[in-house]
């Protein structure tokens, strides 16, 4: 774990090109609709941890919620600020670490979207994050977050072989069609998938090669980690439609309150 960051140092390069990130992961309507609905249900102020390029927080702010985004990557933060300014949306953007922060105020909703929590590899880091969230929740406030539900089959397929991910290909206005290859191994002792992502065009093979490491958090772990952080689970869903969580759900979607 990088002493200055909320994720492993090896993953920082992955987020250094914010525009490339947005083209790789354009986002979908369901997660955005879910988090907008959570903000409306809670009312009041919103804090997003790991706010990225503002894909969810800018629309939430445009709905009238006082919004703050905390992000570790300066490049992602700059792109979020540019997008918000372009759309005339007021958001307070802060550079910071989701493990330990003190904004000297509380929020009605804190959310951590799109697996951002999984950059925290150690159990102590996760607990520290939850404790920081607990200190920033207003009375009646909620923490909402989503992480993937680890699949043993998929983890077993992380065999160190470089493979093309056709579903991740995208068009870059300057480069043309960009193909993405991924090479991954799974460290079972650490519960961390260690990957390398290769971005290529016909004219420029491997023009970006970026490491990315993501932790797996299994369903029985999360309530315990949350409890250690002073939070308790009040709802758990398996998809964006709020269906109950089941063993074959691809998603773990948690709603938590102070314990």
Image: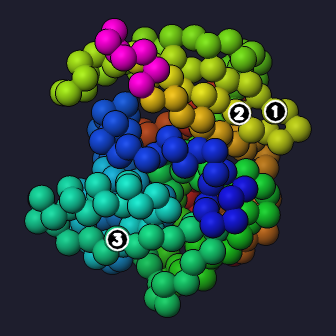
Residue at 31 percent across and 33 percent down: it is: 23
Give the residues drawn in magenta, as a range: 201-207
Indicate the secondary structure of the residue bearing disc 3: strand
The answer to whether residue 206 is magenta is yes
Q: Position of residue 158 (x, y in %)?
A: 71, 20
> Would you say residue 103 is visible in this rendering?
yes
Q: Residues within 10 Å of mark 2 (few under 14, many from 20)?
A: some
Image location (x, y in percent) of residue 153: 73, 17
Q: Name the secondary structure under disc 1.
A: strand
Tell me if 128 is positioned left or right of 20 in this view.
right
Dominant secondary structure of the residues highlighted in magenta in the image: loop
Label 3 crowding class (10 Å Cα cut-off): few <14, some 14-19, many 20+?
many
Specify whether residue 249 is in view.
Answer: no
Q: Say whether disc 2 or disc 1 marks the residue closer to the N-terminus.
A: 1
Q: Label for residue 193?
A: 2
Q: Is residue 17 above or below residue 210?
A: below
Contact between marks 2 and 1 (CB within 8 A): the answer is yes
Q: Earlier in the sequence, mark 1 or mark 3?
A: 3
**Element carrying mark 2:** strand
Residue at (18, 27) in percent of width and height = 173
| Label 1 sits on residue | 187
Q: Percent position (x, y) of residue 126?
A: 71, 61
In this rendering, the answer to whether 154 lies above or below 14 is above
Q: Nearer the viewer, residue 144 or 191?
A: 191
Q: Could you tell me which quadrant the N terminus lies in?
A: bottom right
Residues at marks 1 and 3 touching, judged by CB atoms closer than 8 Å: no
Marks 2 and 1, how far apart in space? 6 Å
Cα gap from disc 2 to disc 3, whole angstroms: 30 Å
Q: Mark 2 or mark 3: which comes first in sequence?
A: 3
How many marks on residues? Answer: 3
- Which residue was labeled with disc 3? 93
């Amino acid at each position: 774990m990088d002493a200055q960051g909320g994720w492993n140092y090896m993953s920082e390069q992955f987020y250094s090109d914010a525009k490339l990130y947005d083209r790789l992961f354009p986002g979908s309507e369901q997660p955005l609709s879910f988090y907008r609905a959570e903000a409306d249900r809670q009312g009041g102020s919103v804090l997003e941890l790991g706010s990225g390029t503002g894909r969810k927080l800018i629309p939430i702010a445009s709905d009238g919620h006082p919004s703050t985004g905390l992000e570790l990557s300066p490049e992602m933060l700059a792109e979020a600020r540019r997008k918000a300014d372009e759309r005339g949306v007021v958001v307070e953007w802060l550079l910071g670490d989701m493990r330990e922060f003190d904004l000297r105020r509380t929020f009605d909703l804190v959310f951590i979207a799109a697996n951002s929590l999984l950059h925290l590899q150690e159990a102590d880091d996760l607990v520290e994050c939850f404790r920081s969230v607990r200190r920033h929740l207003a009375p009646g406030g909620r923490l909402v977050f989503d992480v993937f539900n680890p699949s043993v089959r998929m983890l077993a397929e992380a065999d160190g072989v470089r493979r093309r991910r056709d579903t991740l290909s995208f068009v870059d206005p300057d480069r043309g069609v960009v193909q993405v290859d991924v090479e991954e191994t799974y460290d079972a002792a650490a519960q961390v998938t260690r990957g390398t992502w290769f971005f290529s065009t016909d004219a420029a093979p491997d023009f970006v090669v970026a490491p990315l490491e993501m932790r797996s958090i299994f369903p029985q772990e999360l309530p315990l980690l949350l409890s250690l952080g002073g939070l308790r689970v009040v709802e758990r869903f398996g998809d964006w439609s709020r269906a109950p969580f089941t063993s074959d759900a691809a998603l773990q979607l948690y709603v938590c309150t102070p314990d």
